[in-house]
Structures are given as structure tokens and as C-alpha cells.
Amino acid sequence: MQLPSVLLENAVNEFARLPGIGKKTALRLVLHLLKQDATDVQQFGAAITKMRTEIKFCRRCHNVADTDLCTICASASRKQNMICVVESLRDVIAIETTQQYNGIYHVLGGVISPLDGIGPDQLNIEPFLQRVQKEQPEEIIFALNPTIQGDTTIYYIQKKLTPAVVRITTIARGIAFGGELEYADEMTLARSLANRLPVENYVANR
């Protein structure tokens, strides 16, 4: 793609580095910004920079936050004795969109995947185990993607939680095996949460 300006080309190349953005889409976005008022573009750039430099991760659940605690953990209206374990921030957003869950979360930051060189020590598993021991929740819900890696992670954590006196469930398989929560429709995800199963039954049937 030949562009008449090096500055324009550099901007297009940066946008094209974003996931799902090709060169043509990147060019369309850059040309849109070029037509906007300079102040608006500066505000756009400042918001991105501020987000990247000032955003924090909740010291309790590892969700994104503006302060030490995220808004979900800090909310008095949430069930503080129910923890939903998810793989990523996107899964938190997906579940929150259903408006069917009123507990709190724990973001693992990934799943165990030996082929990709990801082991338990690289995830937020140990902080979760310490959190369970400290907070003594009434229920832990595993809402990991229904994949081999997700199942392996559930199995690993469940074994570590065995001494704890806590109800452990997993979302019902309204979501197809191999699918991802991020792409599930709201009704399917909401139904899976409502019809969650004891995790020992799920593991036994695998």
C-alpha cells in the first residue's frame, strides 16, 4: 500500500497492529481521525495513553480497576461469598453482560497449557488458593472456556481446593466443548450460569 505521507503510513501501521484490524481498516480509521478536530484527536490519544499508564489490577480478583479494588469487589450489593473463576477480563465482561450473576470474580490470566509453556505458576492460581483460605467463600463457580486446557485447569485447582469446605460448581454445558465464553450469546451464557453443576460430577463424566 503506497501512501503519500510517511506520517500517514506510520499511523496506519500502528493501527494495523491491533487484533482484527487489517491495513484497509487501519487506513479508514486514520483518515477518519485526519478529518476530526485536532483537539478531539488529542483527547483520543490522551485517553489511550492514560488508560495504559494509569490502569490498575484489582489486588483481590485481578480484574481491571481504577483503584486498588475494582468496582465489583468494592460493591456492597454483590455477593461477596460467591467467587466466579474466569480465564480473562473478556470473560468477566461477557458474564456481566448477562446481568444474571451477582457474585464476585477471580481472573486467572489464562489456563494451564503445557504445549504453550504455561504452567500453574504463571497464572493467578496461588493467589486464588490463598484467597479462598482467607475468605472462606460459600461457593466457587468455574466459568472457564470448555476446552481441554480449561478442563485441565479446573481439575488442577479442584484438587488443590479439596481440603477446603466449599461448594464447587461449574457452568452448565450450554456452551459447546471447544467454544469460548466471549463468543457465546447472552441467553446461552446466562442459562449456563443458572444451571451450573457440581464440579466433581462434571470431572467424573469427562
Image: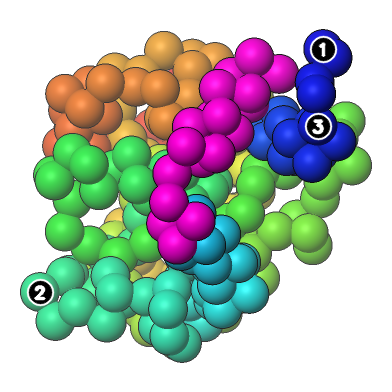
Q: Amino acid at mark 3?
A: Ser
Q: CA distance from mark 3 to mark 1?
A: 12 Å
Name the outermost residue toward the left. Answer: 77
Query: Is residue 106 among the parts visible in the rendering?
Result: no
Decide: marks 3, 1 in contact (CB < 8 A)? Answer: no
The residue under label 2 is which amino acid type? Ser
Instruction: Determine the CA span between mark 2 and mark 3.
Output: 53 Å
Lateral position of residue 202 relative to residue 52, left or right: left
Instruction: Please state if 100 lies on the left or on the right of 143 as rendered.
Output: left
Which residue position holds label 1?
1
Which disc number belongs to residue 77? Answer: 2
Residue 43, x across and y down, in percent: 46, 64
Residue at 16%, 70% in the rendered image: 78
Taking 158 as reference, is 19 above or below it? above
Q: CA gap, disc 2 to disc 1?
A: 53 Å
Q: Which residues are magenta?
A: 23-40
Q: Which residue lies at the image location 79% right of the left edge and 62% below the top edge?
A: 121
Identify the element where label 1 is drawn: loop
Q: Residue at x 24, y 75 (%)?
A: 80
Q: Depth check: 169 or 126 in front?
A: 126
| Residue behind mark 3 | 5
First in sequence: mark 2 or mark 1?
A: 1
Residue 66, percent across and down?
A: 42, 78
In magenta stretch: residue 10: no
State which quarter of the image contains the N terminus.
top right
**Viewer-side residue, 23 vs 101:** 23
The reply to whether residue 172 is visible in this rendering is: yes
Residue 79: image quadrant is bottom left
**Amino acid type for the residue under numbered disc 1:** Met
From the image, state whether disc 2 or disc 3 is nearer to you.
Answer: 3
